[in-house]
Image (tube, helix red, strand yellow):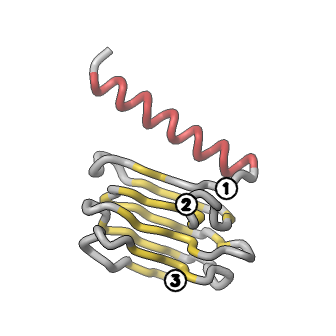
Amino acid sequence: MSLRQIFNSFMVALYFFILFAVHSGATLTQVCAEPQVFPVNVFNISARADDLTGAAIVLDQVEGAVIRNCQALPGTGTFLRLRGRQTRDICLIGNELSMAGRPVSFSEEVREKKIKKLD
């Protein structure tokens, strides 16, 4: 099996994990990737912070992501945590994050501490 086939299998598994988490009502706690080969898209989830990570969604080493039409549930501390030196080009579109104490947080190693917000 080639490295490309292994990578593609991993991406398919990640896609189905996210679908399962969303449709089963589970909390999506982390989306992690090596420096981007593909865009990360998270759509239409309602989540609260996970005890392990302290955030509903954690993006680590992600170059290019869209978080769209998501909702922070009551009791959410941090909704989106950004980690990793390669993390950049993150866009939030039409999210309801008023229930989050902190909608977005950046770890120290994130170089580009800004996100695009479109409502």
Tag 1 residue: 27
The amino acid marked with disc number 2 is Thr
Tag 3 residue: 119
The amino acid marked with disc number 3 is Asp
| Residue 49 percent coordinates (x, y) | 63, 66
Asked where in the image residue 44 lies, by quadrant, the reply is: bottom right
> What residue do we see at 61% from left, 68% from top?
70
> What residue do we see at 59% from left, 64% from top?
56
Asked where in the image residue 75 lies, by quadrant, the reply is: bottom right
Which circle, 1 or 2, is nearer the viewer? Answer: 2
Q: Earlier in the sequence, mark 1 or mark 3?
A: 1
Camera-side residue of 8 and 78: 78
Camera-side residue of 109 and 6: 109
Q: Secondary structure at mark 3?
A: loop
- Residue 38, relative to residue 103: is it above or below? above
Crowding at mark 1 (Cα within 10 Å: few <14, some 14-19, many 20+): some
| Residue 82 percent coordinates (x, y) | 41, 67
Locate the N terminus by quadrant: top left
Q: Are marks 1 and 2 in contact (CB under 8 Å)?
A: no
Tag 2 residue: 53
